Image (spheres, grey):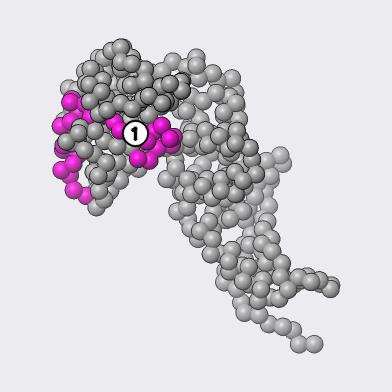
Amino acid sequence: MKKNKYRRLPNGFGTISHLSGKRRKPYVAKAPAVYIIDEDNQTGKYSRLIIGSAETWEKAYQLLLKYNETPYNLSKKNTTLKQVYDAWSKEHFEIVSDSSEKGYKAAFSILENYYDKPFCKLRAFDFENAAKESGKNAPTLKRYKTLINMLYKYAIKYEITTVDFSQAVDLSSLRNRNPNKKKKNIFTKKEIDTLWKSKDKRTVQIILVMIYSGVRIEELLSLTKEDVFLDRQVFEIGDSKTENGIRTVPIADKTLPFFKQFMKEKGKTNHLILNAKGTKFGYHNFRKNYWNPTMEELGMNHRPHETRHTCASLLADHKIEPRTIKKILGHSGAMDLTEKVYTHLDDKVLLDAINTL
């Protein structure tokens, strides 16, 4: 009997096998092999995901073709953490409760500084560092670890990565963490005075903007010139990790000259703050090459998020109303129903508050 011949499939495309016996759908389409680590035995093996079965080779090929057209395959090496999460959550949130969905969203917010990083470039220490810097308590971190495991399972399924680093993430040192007991390391008055003495340095200007606005570093780096309104002396955050984070933020009189300078600068993109290439600053680039060296040069030891704590502390010290502070920071916190309904503060109220600093 003459053997049937089918066209050769491209490398990395997957395989089609024919099962013996009388079967209604004997042709099985399988994805390319991926390497999966066994957490218990600390061993690994190659495995192929079965995409589906079909009556004919051609129909099985169509299954493979459709599979390879997905935006979440190995050829898309720049698929980001946020893209993986969005795709995973679209599937997973259909089968979980509202409370579980809320828990996963809170856990994912821990990784906000890594949203734009390619998933295949993430390593265990990235997830560990994010957890350490988050200040989250043990129950949230438990959900966080579960989320990491599930994201890797999803990413391996769709061949975004071939190695499961979730098994190497060690959060045991944070097991008994209580964020309410964690002392916030805010900038002291002396340190802020030191920053002002170096105000001609661009990185220092960015730090001062953060202290005098309470804006998150990723929010600031994502701002475009269209988001800034010098006539009103405010900028608008239109993309934030929380609904309350979408807000209008006042520009303090002290930092207004910095904004005017930023607005004049031209680059390849229209972002307010540009890197040396004239494009958007990446968080890791800013942290490693600008923030850390500046902290070392000035003899300080702070994380970017501590500018936000500092702003909140300064506003509270100046007896600013809690609802105004929450409005500026974009943080609902313990805001009660009355505050949520009636907190419609105009630009002047916010500006007057920030100018007390």
Residue 302 visible: no
Q: Quadrant of the N terminus?
A: bottom right
Q: Which residue is at 26% across, 50% downward?
A: 269
Magenta span covers which residues? 238-267
The residue labelled by disc 1 is 247
Q: Nearer the viewer, residue 249 or 164?
A: 249
Tell me where residue 170 appears, x and y as whole percent: 58, 32
Say left or right for 69 vs 250: right
- Where on the picture, by quarter, is residue 259? top left
Residue 307 forms part of the magenta stretch: no
Residue 8, image quadrant: bottom right
Q: Amino acid at mark 1?
A: Arg
In this rendering, position of residue 100 left or right of residue 40: left
Q: Is residue 5 visible?
A: yes
Residue at the extreme right: 21
In percent of the image, x 23 and y 43: which residue is there? Answer: 225
- Which is more toward the observer, 329 or 83? 329
Q: In the drawing, does residue 112 fall left or right of residue 202? A: right
Residue at image location 51% in from the left, 47% down from the top: 86
Coordinates of residue 83 in the picture (x, y in percent):
48, 49
Residue 13 horizontal/vertical position (percent): 58, 67
